[in-house]
């Protein structure tokens, strides 16, 4: 799994679970699920709990789904996961596969956060940093 550090993002932890590999950055999580996995809230609870432990509910957070492999997902798990993270600001998908890119319109129904699709991981990082920066600016205006 490629490590990309942005202007504001430093790698804190990299961990391998039964369902895939995850990188936890300052305010970003990059997930890469394994080929053929069916992802549910229940089998994704370990990386979800790790993210919850690292970021709590006060650190702004963007999730990047690095979709190198083909896998299926139960979209109902999105609602449960998003509700656990009131600090969740955005969702980026990185994929070159046309079909996986088209699924984003369905996923948006369950996520209700800014969502973007990219061909390259570094593009997703740039977008995520923009989302995080905009959040800082919005909070300073209050």
Image (cartoon, grey):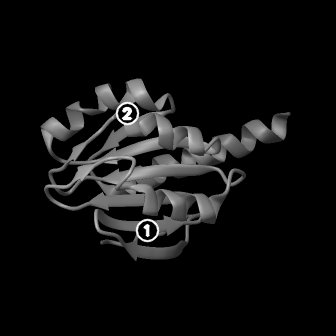
Helix, strand or loop at disc 1?
strand
Asked whether, in this view, residue 118 is left or right of residue 49, the answer is left
Residue 104 x/y as whole percent:
30, 32
Residue 72 x/y as whole percent:
20, 44
Residue for point 29% across, 68% down: 18
Asked whether, in this view, residue 126 is left or right of residue 131, the answer is left
Mark 2 vs 1, N-terminal side:
1
Asked whether, in this view, residue 134 is left or right of residue 80, the answer is right
Near-viewer residue (50 or 90): 50
Name which quarter of the figure residue 66 lies in: bottom left
| Residues packed near mark 1 inside 10 Å, few (<14), some (14 to 19) or many (20 plus) | many
Which quarter of the rendering shows the C terminus?
A: top right
Which circle marks residue 67 in the picture? none
Which circle marks residue 23 in the picture? 1
Residue for point 18% across, 50% down: 71
Near-viewer residue (41 or 139): 41
Residue for point 74% across, 36% down: 138
Q: Closer to the camera: disc 2 or disc 1?
A: 2
Asked whether, in this view, residue 114 is left or right of residue 88, the answer is left
As measured in the structure, the alpha-carbon distance from the residue carrying label 2 to the one carrying label 1 is 23 Å
Which quarter of the rendering shows the N terminus?
A: bottom left
Asked if residue 89 is positioned above or below residue 110 in the image, the reply reads below
Residue for point 38% across, 51% down: 42
Helix, strand or loop at disc 2?
helix
What residue would you read off at disc 2?
76
Residue 70 x/y as whole percent:
14, 51
Q: Are marks 2 and 1 in contact (CB under 8 Å)?
A: no
Name which quarter of the figure residue 37 lies in: bottom left
Asked if residue 37 is positioned above or below residue 77 in the image, the reply reads below
Q: How many marks?
A: 2
Near-viewer residue (86 or 84): 84
| Residues packed near mark 2 inside 10 Å, few (<14), some (14 to 19) or many (20 plus) | few
């Amino acid at each position: 799994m490629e490590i990309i550090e942005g202007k504001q993002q430093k790698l804190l932890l990299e961990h391998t679970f039964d369902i895939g590999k995850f990188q936890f950055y300052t305010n970003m999580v990059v997930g890469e699920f394994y080929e053929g996995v069916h992802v549910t809230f229940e089998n994704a609870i370990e990386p979800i709990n790790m993210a919850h432990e690292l970021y709590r509910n006060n650190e702004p957070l963007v999730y990047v789904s690095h979709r190198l492999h083909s896998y299926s997902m139960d979209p109902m798990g999105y609602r449960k996961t998003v509700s656990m993270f009131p600090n969740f600001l955005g969702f980026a998908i990185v994929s070159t596969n046309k079909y996986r890119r088209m699924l984003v319109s369905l996923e948006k129904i369950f996520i209700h956060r800014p969502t973007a699709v990219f061909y390259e991981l570094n593009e997703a990082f740039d977008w995520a940093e923009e989302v995080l920066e905009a959040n800082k600016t919005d909070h300073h205006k209050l």
